[in-house]
Amino acid sequence: MKIIHLSDLHLGKRLNEYSLLEDQQHILLSIIGIIKEEKPDSVLIAGDVYDKAVASTEAITLFNSFLVRLSELDTQVFIISGNHDSPERLTSYSELLIDCIHIAPVYDGSVRPIMLSDEYGEVGIYMLPFVKPAHVSRYAEGVEIKSYTDALACAIDKMDIDENRRNVLITHQFVTGAQRTESEEISVGGTDNVDAGVFEPFDYVALGHLHAAQNCGKETVRYCGTPLKYSFSEAKHTKSVTIVELLEKGSVKVRTKELVPLHDLVELKGSYDEITNKAFYDGTTYQQDYTHITLTDEQDIPDAIGKLRTIYRHLMKLDYDNKRTRSSAEITADEKAAEKSPLELFSEFYEKQNNQPMSDEQTRFITEMIEKTWEAKQ
């Protein structure tokens, strides 16, 4: 049985205020192309379909279009909600879908498998949406749930799995030891860790939540990663879909197929003269890519963003790496704040948000506002 494992579509995602809907539409069409080529028996989407619990109309329309295309192919589709999704919203229209598309219901203490079969026998597909210990505790019937591992162990134990057949779990959690990126939500102190040992009854575990494709101890417990790069911490990732082949019990083959984005996400570093030299970007896709540029010049370049955008059309972020910035980095945030005036602090905040300094008129306005506030307090 051939399976294609997807997760973390994050439809509706914005990056540095850029809408990624066009990029997401492109990558979903690429995925449809891979599905047509591979002809899998099932497609698994392991959560975070949307980037927000209340998804935008555009994001919903894009996902609906993707589902329509999937429904036209000869494959079964299994979808669970992730921590970014509203499970109630995602489940609400499941009864309207045709038989080949299955959406996991809101967790109610039981997970019933959907059975598929091939020449090697039956395969049980279990869909466990993102859950917290409190969700599972309601149905634990006297079992003490202190951690995410306890919660997953309890939920899996209640599935009453027949380990003589092949079983697949789709879930959305953070497995201990996996590598995070800055674009993922992080629980304080790592309290959301789940020990991979709880997945022992399954022949393959299709994980969602983390954005880097990776195995967790063994290749049959796997994050497929996001189909697109969603932060510059992912700039060096190679995005792909994971293709799984379940043969006889105990025999599983896992491989990947690379995804090519409409616009890549890249980090570039050098002096202004180096970065703007045609030899630097000629023959590359940098001019079309989403870029984070770090200039090494000791002096700030006037209107650097405006000038650089004449070459790098999708410049998202500009930083400097020089003696001044390295020296500043050595001072703690609290020390910096204590040394700066309210106007300096607001100016820095504005520049970080807008990638450009305030104009003289804006500076005068904020100065007057600060002075009036101080006068009112005296």
Image: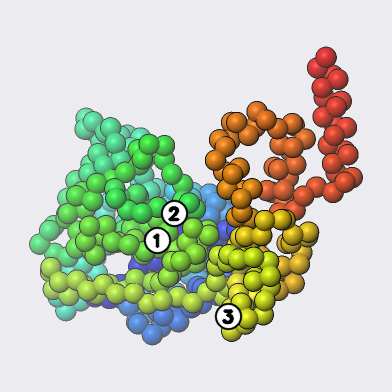
Q: Position of residue 199 (x, y in %)?
A: 21, 53
Query: Which of disc 3 and disc 2 is earlier in sequence?
Result: 2
Which residue is label 1 attached to?
212
Amino acid type for the residue under numbered disc 1: Ala
Count residues near mark 1 (Cα–Cα under 10 Å), then give few for <14, some for 14-19, many for 20+.
Answer: many
In this figure, which residue is indicated by the disc labeled 2? 181
What residue lies at 68% left-to-right and 70% top-to-bottom? 273
Q: Is residue 6 visible?
A: yes
Q: Residues within 10 Å of mark 3 (few under 14, many from 20)?
A: few
Q: Is residue 45 left or right of residue 116?
A: right
Looking at the image, residue 373 sits to the left or right of residue 291; the answer is: right
Nearest-to-viewer mark from 2 and 3 = 3
Q: What kind of element bears circle 1?
A: loop
Give the image location of residue 207, x and y in percent: 33, 58
Q: Which residue is found at the position 41% from the left and 80% from the top?
A: 34
Q: Which residue is mark 3?
A: 284
Q: CA distance from mark 2 to mark 1?
A: 7 Å
